[in-house]
Image: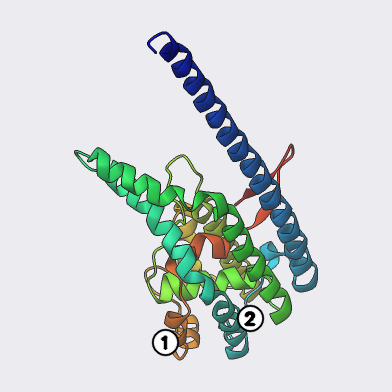
């Protein structure tokens, strides 16, 4: 019996190794399939995004009305897009919370290994489908914009002034990470400053809240537009919609709500 045991153990080890190999192979196949599906989805997203810009204008060319207000019909269009996206808010919020829990635990003075591993496991369960969930959200946003007749530039401007400036919602990233660039500072707020600059030029303004805010934003690219107070015309436009704007807010999805998808020069896609 003792002479047989080494061979038996070797057989067990080989079987275990074979089993691990099969599991790893399956995981690799699933990972490749998920990446393929995600890239395919983002490819469709870019197509819809490009159609939005063809029909409703380039996002970097958006011009506010001559009086600087937000017309009620355009706010109604914006809210229709928001209402269509709200059923996805709970799922996005859950994913964001799971990863935030990991970051919070890891940042603690003495992170408990068991608690950290538990939170990592909670976040890991979202990883197989996370890319698809995010991609579907952005694609639905683009399709709603296409259907409602609203461009990305107008949507972004209303989003920033309504949620960040008027309601005081903080720009929240769907996944935290200091090594990841921030689309708020790198693109959204820069483009918002462009909207303000175009209005200042078109209206021939030389003083007032629009001119003052443009100067502040040029000094600080991370500044939320009009975070210290909206111009009277913008504040008046948003006031009667305040309650509905609050009901249609999904802070955890802010980064997705404002992201654009672009192809990389080599392979895959970037979001910024």
Q: Can residue 259 be seen in this view?
A: no
Which residue lies at the image location 33% right of the left edge and 52% below the top edge? Answer: 101
Q: In the rendered view, does 229 fall on the left or right side of 59?
A: left
Left or right relative to 32: residue 231: left
- Of all residues, the one furthest to the front in this rendering is 1
Residue 65 badge:
2
Closer to the eye: label 1 or 2: 1
Q: Quadrant of the N terminus?
A: top left
Q: What is the residue that sits farthest to the left in this orientation?
A: 110
Q: Where is residue 50 in the image (x, y as percent from the top left)?
A: 77, 62
The residue at 37%/10% (across/down) is: 2
Residue 144 visible (yes or no): yes
Mark 1–mark 2 Cα distance, whole angstroms, equals 24 Å
Mark 2 crowd level (few <14, some 14–19, many ≥20, 10 Å Cα): few
User: Which residue carries the number 1 mark?
Assistant: 243
Q: Residues within 10 Å of mark 1 (few under 14, many from 20)?
A: few
| Extreme residue in the top direction | 3
Q: Position of residue 126 (x, y in %)?
A: 48, 53
Asked if the residue under mark 2 is in contact with the one under mark 1, i.e. CB atoms within 8 Å, the reply is no
> Residue 18: x, y in percent?
57, 26
């Amino acid at each position: 019996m003792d002479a047989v045991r080494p061979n038996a153990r070797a057989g067990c080890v080989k079987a275990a190794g074979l089993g691990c190999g099969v599991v790893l192979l399956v995981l690799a196949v699933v990972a490749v399939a998920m990446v393929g599906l995600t890239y395919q989805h983002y490819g469709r997203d870019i197509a819809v995004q490009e159609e939005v810009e063809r029909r409703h204008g380039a996002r970097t060319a958006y011009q506010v009305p001559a009086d600087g207000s937000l017309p009620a019909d355009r706010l109604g269009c914006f809210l229709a897009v928001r209402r269509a996206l709200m059923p996805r808010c709970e799922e996005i919020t859950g994913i964001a919370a799971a990863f935030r829990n990991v970051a919070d635990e890891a940042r603690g003075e003495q992170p408990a290994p068991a608690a950290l591993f538990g939170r990592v496991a909670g976040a890991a369960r979202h990883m197989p489908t996370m890319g698809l969930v995010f991609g579907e959200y952005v694609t639905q946003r683009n399709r709603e914009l296409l259907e409602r007749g609203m461009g990305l530039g107008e949507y972004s401007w209303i989003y920033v002034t309504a949620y960040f400036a008027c309601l005081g919602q903080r720009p929240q990233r769907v996944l935290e990470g200091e090594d990841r660039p921030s689309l708020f500072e790198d693109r959204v707020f820069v483009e918002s400053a462009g909207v303000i600059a175009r209005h200042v030029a078109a209206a021939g303004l030389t003083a007032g809240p629009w001119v003052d805010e443009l100067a502040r934003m040029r000094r600080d690219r991370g500044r939320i537009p009009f975070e210290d107070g909206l111009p009277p015309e913008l504040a008046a436009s948003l006031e009667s919609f305040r309650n509905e704007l609050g009901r249609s807010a999904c802070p955890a999805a802010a980064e997705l709500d404002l992201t654009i998808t672009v192809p990389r020069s080599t392979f895959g896609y970037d979001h910024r």
